[in-house]
Image (tube, rainbow, N blue to C red):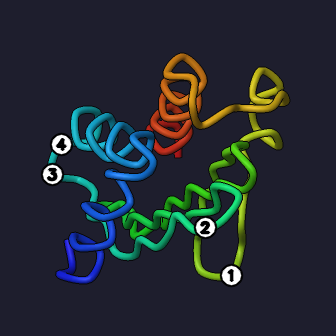
Amino acid sequence: MSHNATKSLAEGTAKRPSMGFINNEMKMLFKDDICLTECWGPVQMCVYRMDYIHIPSGYKIIFECERGVIVAQIANNDIITYLTEIYPEANYLHYENKEADLKHLINLVYKAISDI
């Protein structure tokens, strides 16, 4: 994890506990296979972003939150895949203040990476 990402995560988690929750769940599921590469926010209206790299595959995992709604994407070079394209059960609003929504989204990311 880069120093800037670590600092941003610590500052962000103080304002938006969901940032720390996402990071902890990601580390628990992926163990040493991921690294937080970028993190910024939160800014007004609960906007933040967290970028991870999945080390074995080189895929980028991106969590973006805007106005309390969070989405996850998986990027391979310039091709971005939204989870709703793979899993119909992801096609509803996931709220950053609901642990069940965050767990659901993180588990779908893990499933998608595992299926690749």
Q: Mark 1–mark 4 contact, CB under 8 Å? A: no
Q: Give x and y (percent) for residue 106.
A: 49, 34
Q: Mark 2–mark 1 contact, CB under 8 Å? A: yes
Q: Residue at x 73, y 43 (%)?
A: 69
Q: Mark 2–mark 4 contact, CB under 8 Å? A: no
Label 4, secondary structure: give it: helix
Q: Mark 3–mark 4 contact, CB under 8 Å? A: yes
* Pointer 1 local density, CA inside 10 Å: few below 14, some 14–19, many at least 20: few
Q: Give x and y (percent) for residue 58.
A: 40, 70
Q: CA distance from mark 3 to mark 4?
A: 4 Å
Q: Where on the picture, by quarter, is residue 96?
A: top right
Q: Which residue is mark 3?
A: 32
Give the amino acid at mark 2: Ala
Residue in the foreground of this view, choosing between 50 and 45: 45
Label 3, secondary structure: give it: helix
Q: Which residue is mark 2?
A: 75
Q: Which residue is mark 1?
A: 78
- Mark nearest the camera among 1 and 4 is 4
Q: Earlier in the sequence, mark 2 or mark 4?
A: 4
Give the amino acid at mark 1: Asp
Q: CA distance from mark 3 to mark 1?
A: 24 Å
Q: Earlier in the sequence, mark 3 or mark 2?
A: 3
Q: Where on the picture, by quarter, is residue 65?
A: bottom right
Q: Mark 3–mark 2 contact, CB under 8 Å? A: no
Label 1, secondary structure: give it: loop
Q: Where on the picture, by quarter, is residue 45?
A: bottom right
Q: Earlier in the sequence, mark 3 or mark 1?
A: 3
Q: Which residue is mark 4?
A: 31
Q: CA distance from mark 3 to mark 2?
A: 19 Å
* Pointer 3 local density, CA inside 10 Å: few below 14, some 14–19, many at least 20: few
Q: Residue at x 29, y 74 (%)?
A: 5
